Amino acid sequence: MKISMLIYCFLLSLSLSQQIDVTFRYVKEPTESFNRIFVPGTMPDGTSNDWGPNSNGMISPSAPSQMIYNENNNSYEKSYSLQIGEEYLYKLHFHYNESGGDYAWVSDPMNPETTSDGWDNSILFVTDPLFFQPARHINDDGMVNGLSLGIHTNAQIDSIKYKVGNDNFISDGYFFENGNFYVPFQTPRSLFESYKIEVSIEGQNYIAYDQPEITITEESMPSFLNEGPNWIDGTMYLSIFAPSQPVVQVIVTDAGESGSISDALVLKKDPVKEFHWWIDLDLANGEYDYEYLLMDGTRLPDPYSRRIINGRTRIEVGPGGVSTADDFSWESEGSYNRPNLEDLIIYELHVDDFAAMGNGLGKFSDVQNRLDYFQSLGINAIELMPITTIGGVHSWGYDLSSHLALNERYGTPHDLKSFVDQAHLRGIAVILDQVWNHVRREGALY
């Protein structure tokens, strides 16, 4: 029995320590311009090269996490040896000038999994086999001139075959290097066609990539719809203005889940209003997340989101509506009288700093608990510094990534309404410091 247990423990430790080489890629868009790109993260976790390395957010131009362009697969690459069964966090880091002083941190557009801690780091859970970062390569005319996919395994690959539209499967004409499959198309194909990659590994067949055909339906958008989510007469509608996009899709999932491109729904195109797309969602009551899917694979929350979690818009099909708190019951309704502008005595505060709970831990409820203190000061208005979503854990809020969605670290829309309601019961107005004229690079409107 002891010998069996020892053998089991040995085999378990062996499997847990097994590694696999994974090559991260980035496929540059035709109109995109940058000096260099890096893929830093926890891949060399606990080493001096962890997350770049970076200094106050900036990565050195000579950092080891830099990606190198590979003309054979038309993408930038960086390889890491990773532990099977482990989870890694990472992000893309761009330099827009030679020194690297003009930079940006961006979630991987070819990987929908991100953290919910305010950093929106991309998540990679390593498996064997690992099918990673599917991409259709787009030329200047908006046509697909190549197809690529990371296929990483320690086992023997028997075959790789692919097809586009109604073509038969093809098993040659591609490059396979560093675990990355890439096939160039001599004759560019349409974005609207279906794309499929099948892989056979030691006798086991896998559908590694499956992009269904896209069909666009033209139908006039109802006149009562506004841009963003609309909860009207028991139906949830989505509407978006998307200039120059040949098609817009949306991926809708249960709250907290992420979906695949095969789950995407195609929005209807308004035949008269240029670049306007819309859809009515047939869903049972409950909370859902959704994100828009663009043809280049980019996933974005709704620019009109009231609530964003894990980079996806959260809504409720039901009384909670577009904010999940549309049905809030106001105690102060009918009794609150707003002070005249000339009579305002304003106390301005930053939610996180005022709460003094530690960076990223302050909440609306912490401020609400001090409302009697504010009332004792004789003030009649509280001005909140920007409370919309930001990049990272702590900020004064002026580097926002969404103009309308709350910083989830501060609380939910219900929590904000509760704070406002309790302030109004004490005769205290609440003023919001709004920022409209700029947004971070990762914002949907950038």
Image (spheres, rainbow, N blue to C red):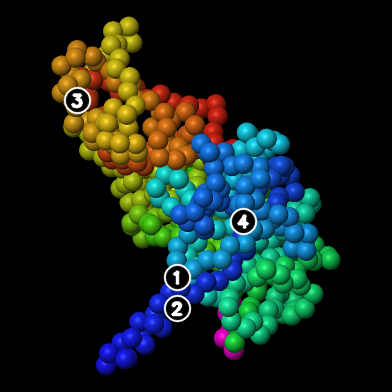
- Of the residues tagged 4 and 1, which is closer to the observer? 1
Q: Residues within 10 Å of mark 4 (few under 14, many from 20)?
A: some
Query: Does 437 lie within the magenta span?
Result: no
Q: Nearer the viewer, residue 357 or 243?
A: 357
On the image, the x and y values in percent for residue 12 come to 39, 80
Do the CB atoms of the residues marked 2 and 3 lie less than 8 Å apart?
Answer: no
The residue sitting at the right extreme is 186
Residue, disc 1: 85
The residue sitting at the top extreme is 342
Considering only order in the chain, which callout, 1 or 2, is on the residue closer to the N terminus?
2
Callout 2, which amino acid?
Ser
Q: Give the residues drawn in magenta, as a range.
A: 203-207
Residue, disc 2: 15
Relative placement, left or right, of 19 versus 375 is right
Considering only order in the chain, which callout, 1 or 3, is on the residue closer to the N terminus?
1
Considering only order in the chain, which callout, 2 or 4, is on the residue closer to the N terminus?
2
The quarter of the picture where the N terminus appears is bottom left
Identify which residue is drawn at 54% across, 42% down: 54
- Of the residues tagged 3 and 1, which is closer to the observer? 1
Q: Residues within 10 Å of mark 2 (few under 14, many from 20)?
A: few
Considering only order in the chain, which callout, 3 or 4, is on the residue closer to the N terminus?
4
The Cα–Cα distance between marks 2 and 1, rounded to whole angstroms, is: 9 Å
Q: How many numbered discs, if any?
A: 4
Residue 297, numbered circle: 4
Do the CB atoms of the residues marked 2 and 1 lie less than 8 Å apart?
Answer: yes
Relative placement, left or right, of 13 versus 279 is left
- Of the residues tagged 4 and 2, which is closer to the observer? 2
